């Protein structure tokens, strides 16, 4: 989305923009947001393992950062968490089903 936004305005600097996301940015995403100069980041659910906007660490307030961004958390947190959990539950089920289909195919080939 960052790349598309930059292409849309023909500038990689997304000055005076706000990004709304369901999950707190990880360190890599936080770096991309800082580099693109997004002014404000609003996220719903915290990332307890890799959150880089205040949960595990805060790259947006680091003195090493060359740009600062306003961060707001907790917007529709329960809804975001539910959506993320449903997505990953569905993905695990799809992966499990695909593996089972591959095993079934192998079993038929061995007969």
Image (spheres, grey):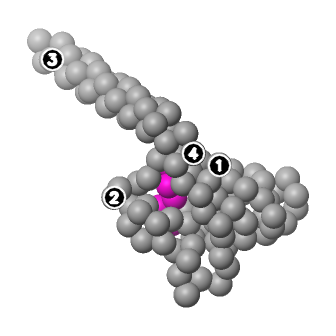
**Label 3: few (<14), some or many (≥20) within 10 Å?**
few
In magenta stretch: residue 35: no
Is tag 2's residue or tag 1's residue first in the polypeptide sequence? Answer: 1
Q: Which residue is mark 1?
A: 20
Which contiguous range is marked in magenta?
Answer: 23-28
Name the image quarter holding the C terminus: top left
Q: Is residue 47 left or right of residue 72?
A: left
Farthest left residue?
111
Element type at mark 1: strand
Left or right? Give the position of 96 relative to 62: left
Q: Nearer the viewer, mark 3 or mark 2?
A: 2
Q: Nearer the viewer, residue 74 or 53?
A: 74
Give the x, y percent position of residue 40.
Answer: 69, 62
Q: Secondary structure at mark 4?
A: loop
Q: Can you identify the residue that label 3 sits on?
A: 107
Question: Marks 3 and 2, Cα distance to the nearest angstrom?
Answer: 39 Å
Secondary structure beneath label 3: helix
- Of labels 1 and 4, the one closer to you: 4
Left or right of residue 95, residue 87 in this image: right
For the residue pair 100 and 27, the one nearer the viewer reads as 27
65 vs 12: above or below? below
Query: Which residue corresponds to the image point at 88% horizontal and 61% vertical from the top-left?
Result: 10
What residue occupies the far right of the structure in this picture? 9
Dot 4, crowdedness within 10 Å: few (<14), some or many (≥20)? some
Q: Earlier in the sequence, mark 4 or mark 2?
A: 2
Q: Position of residue 70 (x, y in %)?
A: 65, 67
* Residue corresponding to mark 2: 49
Residue that badge 4 annotates: 75
């Amino acid at each position: 989305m960052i790349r598309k936004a930059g292409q849309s305005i023909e500038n990689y600097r997304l000055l005076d923009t706000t990004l709304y996301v369901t999950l707190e940015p990880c360190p890599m995403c936080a770096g991309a947001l800082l580099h693109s100069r997004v002014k404000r980041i609003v996220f719903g659910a915290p990332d307890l393992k890799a959150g880089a906007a205040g949960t595990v660490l805060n790259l947006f307030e680091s003195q090493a950062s060359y740009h600062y961004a306003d961060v707001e958390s907790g917007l529709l947190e329960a809804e975001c968490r539910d959506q993320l959990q449903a997505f990953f539950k569905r993905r695990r089920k799809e992966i499990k089903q695909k593996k089972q289909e591959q095993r079934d195919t192998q079993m038929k080939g061995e007969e």
